[in-house]
Amino acid sequence: MMSDAKLILVGQVAGGFGVRGEVRVTAFTADPLALKAYGPLLRADGSVGLTLTTARAAKGAVIGRAKEIETKEQADALRGLKLFVPRERFPAPDEDEVYVTDLIGLEARDPDGRVLGRIKAVQNFGASDMLEITPAEGGQTWYLPFTLEATPELHIADGWILAVRPAEVGEREPD
């Protein structure tokens, strides 16, 4: 059990596949085959949920055999099981990349260094990623586009990002 590790949701069991005990797992990763590379996939409580021994990609999912499953019925019984991986198992991101999970909890600071709030979540409503910010003074959360213009600096190791709020509709932009 890994109670101290930060667990990241990477997939969910969709059910059995075929009649030989294969399982279909919906992947929430950029590369579905990464699910096998991560090693044992954990349940929310940190116990082992699935250990994929074979895997092949299939439209946003992985189909394969798991050490814990011998029959289609066993695979079907796990339908809906959320699968996690400890954050430290992820490879280091490229220089111009960031894991969304690493943004959660960071302070959002304005160009003067004033703390505007903390990143509560990263949402995507169809156009692009938006950082949901919980205001430092309390109140309703607000959204900041996760773009180079609105977040020109990320200081993840130091626990903060530079947040440049866009002008409100109807506001004049500074000269």
Image (tube, rainbow, N blue to C red):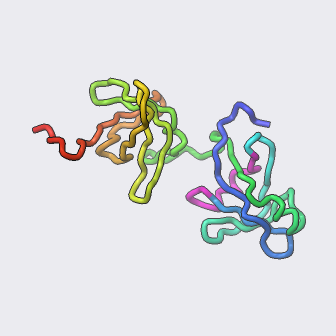
Q: Is 112 on the left-hand or right-hand side of 62?
A: left
Give the extent of the magenta segment.
28-43
Q: Is 108 on the left-hand or right-hand side of 21?
A: left
Q: Quadrant of residue 175?
A: top left
Q: Residue at x 64, y 48 (%)?
A: 9
Vertically, is 41 above or below 153? below
Q: Is 130 on the left-hand or right-hand side of 24?
A: left
Q: Residue at x 37, y 25 (%)?
A: 115
Residue found at the very far right of the displayed protein: 70
Q: Residue at x 59, y 56 (%)?
A: 29
Q: Quadrant of residue 77?
A: bottom right
Looking at the picture, tell me which residue is in the foreground, 34 or 164.
164
Q: Quadrant of the N terminus?
A: top right
The percent coordinates of residue 100 (x first, y second) are: 51, 45
Q: Residue at x 23, y 42 (%)?
A: 167
Looking at the picture, tell me which residue is in the foreground, 101 or 97.
101
Task: Say if the magenta span includes residue 22.
Answer: no
Vertically, is 67 above or below 96? below
Looking at the picture, tell me which residue is in the foreground, 79 or 60.
79
Vertically, is 175 above or below 115? below
The percent coordinates of residue 5 (x first, y second) are: 69, 35
The percent coordinates of residue 161 (x first, y second) are: 39, 34
Task: Say if the magenta span includes residue 29.
Answer: yes
Residue found at the very far left of the displayed protein: 175
Residue found at the very far bottom of the displayed protein: 18
Taken as a whole, is the magenta stretch helix, strand or loop? Answer: loop
The percent coordinates of residue 11 (x first, y second) are: 67, 55
Q: Quadrant of residue 125?
A: bottom left
